Image (tube, rainbow, N blue to C red):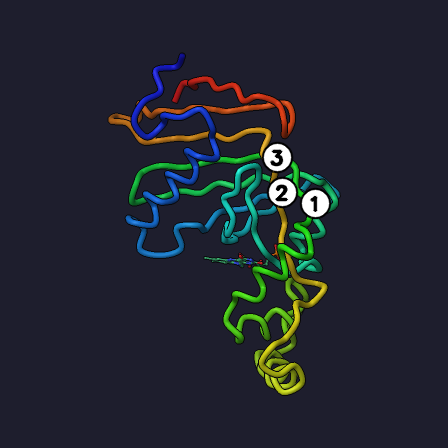
Amino acid sequence: MNERSGIFEGSDPFVIARRWLEDARAAEPSDPDAAALASVDENGMPNVRVVLIRGFEDDAFVFYTNYRSAKSQELEGAGKAAFVIHWKSLARQIRVRGTVARASAAQSDAYFRGRPLESRIGAWASQQSRVLESRALLAEEVERLSAELGSEPPRPEHWGGFRLTPAEIEFWSAGEFRLHDRFRWTRSGPQAPWSVVRLWP
Ligand SMILES: Cc1cc2nc3c(=O)[nH]c(=O)nc-3n(C[C@H](O)[C@H](O)[C@H](O)COP(=O)(O)O)c2cc1C
């Protein structure tokens, strides 16, 4: 094998990723699930922004957003995405690349129901990524929709989850004098077995 031990040990990269997230929950002062999510537009121009990876599941990573946002156009246009999480306090990073598709309505509904009311109203109010004339207009929209939707707003159709199904997951941990450890897991499809290699730092 590749002398994987300690924090790299295991036969399933999703299990390792969850373990690292738990380590980060104990060590990071805020948003241990914040990832820089990369996409590419129709001209091949890359784009990147932070989102929260809310689901570290058995076969996918899940995040939530506005389906009319710039990122959603790019994600759905290409069908592929990548993200990186850097845990500074642990001196570790995880890189993920793969295909991306909308989560089921049921999964998005369940997540939406668990959000604070203000965030649920915000999902209705925000035309994410469009030009906003003034902050006041946003406040007006929030007020109008709060009155209209009441205390149990349903999930708007334009808001929900994406599932990123990885073809590749890389675990990186800082070593002394930049002699870092890197392990790259790959597989040819969602049901295929994983293989793992050690990479030069
Ligand atoms: C810590 C942090 C967490 C964020 N989480 C999310 C998120 O989960 N979903 C989301 O749509 N935007 C999130 N954002 C905002 C995005 O970075 C971005 O501004 C927004 O989604 C619009 O991106 P787009 O125009 O490329 O679609 C977050 C920003 C930060 C700094």
User: Residue 111 versus residue 97: which sits nearer the camera?
Assistant: 111
Question: For the view shown, which residue lies furthest in the top direction?
Answer: 1
Residue beneath label 3, please? 98
Could you classify mark 3 by the number of other residues whose Cα lies within 10 Å: few (under 14), some (14-19), or many (20 or more)?
some
Q: Amino acid at mark 1?
A: Asp
In this view, 147 is above or below 23: below
Q: Are marks 2 and 1 in contact (CB under 8 Å)?
A: yes
Dot 1: element: loop
Q: Amino acid at mark 2?
A: Pro
User: Residue 147 versus residue 31: which sits nearer the camera?
Assistant: 147
**Left or right, 65 with reference to 157:** left
Residue beneath label 1, please? 41
Q: Amino acid at mark 3?
A: Gly
Residue beneath label 2, please? 46
**Residue 122, position as x, y percentages in the image:** 58, 72
Q: Residue at x 65, y 26 (%)?
A: 189
Q: How far apart are the two marked residues, 2 and 1, measured between alpha carbons?
A: 6 Å
Dot 3: element: strand
Dot 2: element: strand
> Whereabouts is ligand 1, in terms of quadrant?
bottom right
Sequence-first disc among 3 and 1 = 1
In this view, 188 is above or below 59: above
Picture quadrant where residue 44 is located: top right
**Residue 19, position as x, y percentages in the image:** 37, 38
Q: How far apart are the two marked residues, 3 and 1, measured between alpha carbons?
A: 16 Å
In this view, 122 is above or below 34: below
Q: Residue at x 57, y 21 (%)?
A: 193
